[in-house]
Image (cartoon, rainbow, N blue to C red):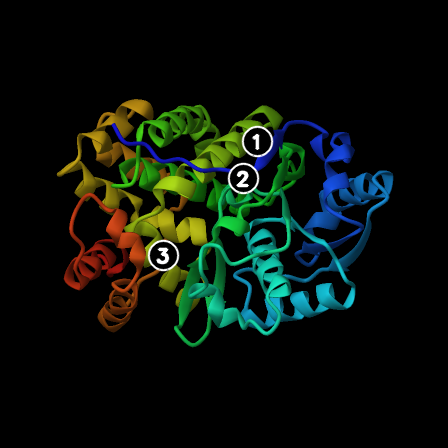
């Protein structure tokens, strides 16, 4: 047996962990760049809790707010310039995946003067970065325990991921209380993003006994939330389960990676503005059926989710996302041509061709006769 697993993030999960772990800040210097979205961190209480914790630790901060969904190169360049001007020693991402991913990019750019955002995709895995702290306020990406960051590349016309050993957050403070007032659409989108991480990582060719153990536990926890998601009946306990499933999914893909669902989902988000988790959800059944034809592990998923067949899985996803967009054949061909170049396909248990990607898009986005 050969097993590889690496996750250097110090993780605190639970109520009030942001204000309770004040001593953790003492190893990060004297000033932080705090990176957030436009308003959510202020509304959900996470920013106030962070400010209190930083004050107790005698750590100053510079606030960079306004990170947009699917952040651009311009945003991370501006954030890095803000951090350099303030002479910060640590970058804190507070928010959903976009804010934390932007913080990762800024941390790399600040540690490498003259580096352009485009170079994030060609950097060495040992490229340095300022220390990163992640405080997630959505339950979906798991980015608080992964090295991955995703930005919008306008030249390539899609979202693209970067990673390095030093883009793992050194510290993650995870409290589901910040998700209590999430809009329902975001709750669903992010929950299915977490599910896609658990599924894609589980069937990945890079999976191993450790990632499988985490994925199976995450799927069991997700199963406990499925009826709540279907019926819009969610409480704090369910929010905590979804957050835990998300974090476990992040730990899985940090080693096992994602696969074709993510590769196809990126152009859907870029061109059609479909939220990332929803784009994944539209494609999950097509992916898992193909995996089931070559991998017994895929059918183990049905047992973990207590479903009899993939049709039942599709029914669940159809209740979550009842409306789909329609793509023209030209759009389907375009997105398949973009997605075929993704490295994610190498993790699949089956061989991917451009024709197969077109077929998956056609299954899910063609006009019904």
Q: Which of 367 and 299 is in front in this view?
A: 299
- Residue 265 marker: 3
Residue 306 makes an appearance in the image: no
Classify mark 1: helix, strand or loop: helix
Q: Give percent across and percent down for residue 368.
A: 22, 57
Q: Please indicate whether residue 56 sits to the left or right of residue 34 in the image.
A: right
Which mark is in front, 1 or 2?
A: 2
> What residue do we see at 35% from left, 53% from top?
262
The image quadrant that residue 301 belongs to is: top left
106 versus 8 height, above or below: below
Q: Please indicate whether residue 196 sits to the left or right of residue 117 in the image.
A: left
Q: Quadrant of the N terminus?
A: top left
Q: Distance between the residues labelled 1 and 2?
A: 8 Å
28 versus 330 height, above or below: above
Sequence-first tag of 1 and 2: 2
The image quadrant that residue 212 belongs to is: top left
Q: Which of 345 and 165 is in front in this view?
A: 165
Q: How far apart are marks 3 and 2 (CA)?
A: 18 Å
Residue 227 makes an appearance in the image: yes
Which residue was labeled with disc 1? 239
Q: How crowded is the residue under tag 3: few (<14 C-alpha within 10 Å), some, or many (20+)?
A: many
Which residue was labeled with disc 2? 139
Sequence-first tag of 3 and 1: 1
């Amino acid at each position: 047996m050969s097993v590889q697993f690496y996750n250097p993030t110090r993780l605190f999960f639970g109520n009030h962990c942001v204000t309770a772990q004040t001593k953790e800040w003492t190893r990060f210097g004297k000033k932080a760049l705090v990176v957030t979205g436009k308003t959510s961190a202020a509304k959900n209480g996470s920013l106030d809790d962070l400010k209190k914790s930083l004050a107790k630790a005698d750590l100053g901060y510079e606030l960079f707010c306004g990170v947009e969904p699917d952040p651009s190169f311009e945003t991370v360049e501006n954030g890095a310039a803000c951090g350099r001007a303030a002479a910060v020693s640590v970058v804190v991402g507070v928010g959903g995946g976009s804010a934390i991913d932007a913080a990762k990019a800024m941390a790399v750019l600040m540690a490498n003067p003259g580096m352009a955002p485009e170079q994030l995709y060609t950097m060495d895995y040992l490229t340095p970065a300022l220390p990163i702290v992640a405080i997630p306020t959505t339950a979906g990406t798991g980015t608080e325990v992964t090295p991955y960051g995703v930005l919008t590349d306008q030249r390539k016309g899609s979202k693209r991921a970067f990673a390095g050993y030093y883009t793992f957050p050194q510290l993650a403070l995870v409290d589901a209380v910040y998700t209590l007032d999430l809009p329902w659409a975001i709750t669903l989108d992010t929950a299915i993003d977490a599910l896609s991480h658990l599924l894609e990582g589980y069937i990945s060719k890079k999976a191993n006994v450790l990632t499988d153990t985490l994925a199976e536990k995450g799927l069991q926890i997700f199963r406990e939330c499925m009826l709540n998601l279907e019926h819009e009946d969610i409480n704090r306990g369910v929010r905590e389960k979804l957050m835990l499933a998300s974090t476990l999914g992040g730990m899985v893909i940090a080693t096992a990676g994602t696969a074709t669902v993510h590769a196809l989902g990126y152009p859907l988000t870029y061109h059609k503005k479909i939220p990332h988790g929803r784009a994944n959800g539209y494609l999950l059944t097509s992916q898992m059926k193909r995996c089931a034809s070559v991998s017994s592990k895929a059918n183990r998923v049905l047992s973990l989710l207590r479903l009899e067949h993939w049709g039942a899985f599709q029914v669940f996803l159809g209740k979550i996302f009842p409306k789909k967009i329609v793509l023209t054949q030209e759009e389907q061909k375009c997105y398949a041509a973009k997605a075929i170049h993704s490295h994610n396909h190498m993790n699949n248990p089956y061989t991917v061709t451009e024709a197969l990607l077109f077929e998956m898009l056609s299954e899910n986005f063609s006009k019904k006769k």
